[in-house]
Image (cartoon, rainbow, N blue to C red):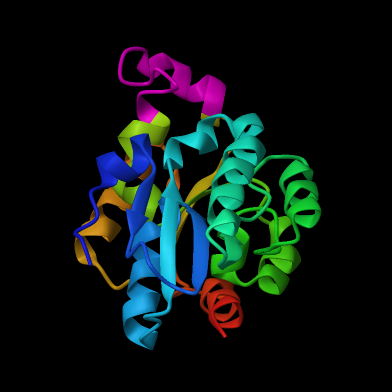
Amino acid sequence: MPTLDDDELTESAVDIDGGGRVAVVACGALAHEIVALKRLNGWEHMSVHCLPAILHNHPDRIPAAVEEAVAAKLAEGVRVFVAYADCGTGGRLEETCRRLGVEMIPGPHCYSFFSGVGNFAETAEEEITAFYLTDFLARQFDAFVTRPLGLDRHPELRETYFGHYEKVVYLAQTEDEVLSGKAREAARTLGLAFERRFTGYGDLAAALARAGG
């Protein structure tokens, strides 16, 4: 398998192991985790097509991008699974997947399925002032938060965007001290308290196991 480059996953679509009986059309923000699970479980029959993670900054574009990718894979005669949650599409992605006859990951976003959708639903209301990070967002904090919001040029905007938050909750998929340090630094940048929770791959592992069966 190729080495995954975060810049490439952010900016462009990437195919990983193009052949296979099952094609996973995935968010680029999940590529590292999906490849790790693929290796761990020996899912040689599974191919992965990652869409640009930067689509998360434009969730209105996600359904059309997923539909195009799914249609291309279905035309190859393989079964397709969509490794996205709703991701801010307001139910439009679910409608798209239903129309195309493909399954997707249940839940509002990756924070929920890494935590476990049930667990996240129970705590979400209590943690309305929490800003969540995953491994990917810890690595790509500048690309997805600092620069798009202009905090690198106008740090005074921090209060405007994050004044109602109280803490950063880092949902860690791996035991990685470097990523934990990046997440802690992100919390300092935002002037928020920091909490780390190890989730592992959460519901993603079970969803991919069902898809690859």
Q: Residue 213: where, in percent of width, then height?
A: 57, 85
In this orientation, which residue lies closer to the viewer: 106 or 129?
106
Relative to 192, does residue 1 appear above or below in the rendering?
Answer: below
The span picked out in magenta is 146-161
In this orientation, which residue lies closer to the viewer: 4 or 107?
4
Q: Residue 4: where, in percent of width, then height?
A: 24, 55
Name the residue rendered at 40%, 82% in the picture: 43
Q: Residue 3: where, in percent of width, then height?
A: 19, 59
Res 150 → quadrant: top left
Name the residue rendered at 31%, 13% in the picture: 153
Relative to 76, does residue 129 appear above or below in the rendering?
Answer: above
Q: Residue 148: where, in percent of width, then height?
A: 42, 23
In this orientation, which residue lies closer to the viewer: 112 or 157?
112
- Magenta run includes residue 169: no
Q: Is residue 164 visible?
A: no
Give left or right: position of 177 versus 199: left
Relative to 130, does residue 121 appear above or below in the rendering?
Answer: below
Relative to 53, does residue 210 appear above or below in the rendering?
Answer: below
Q: Can residue 205 be seen in this view?
A: yes
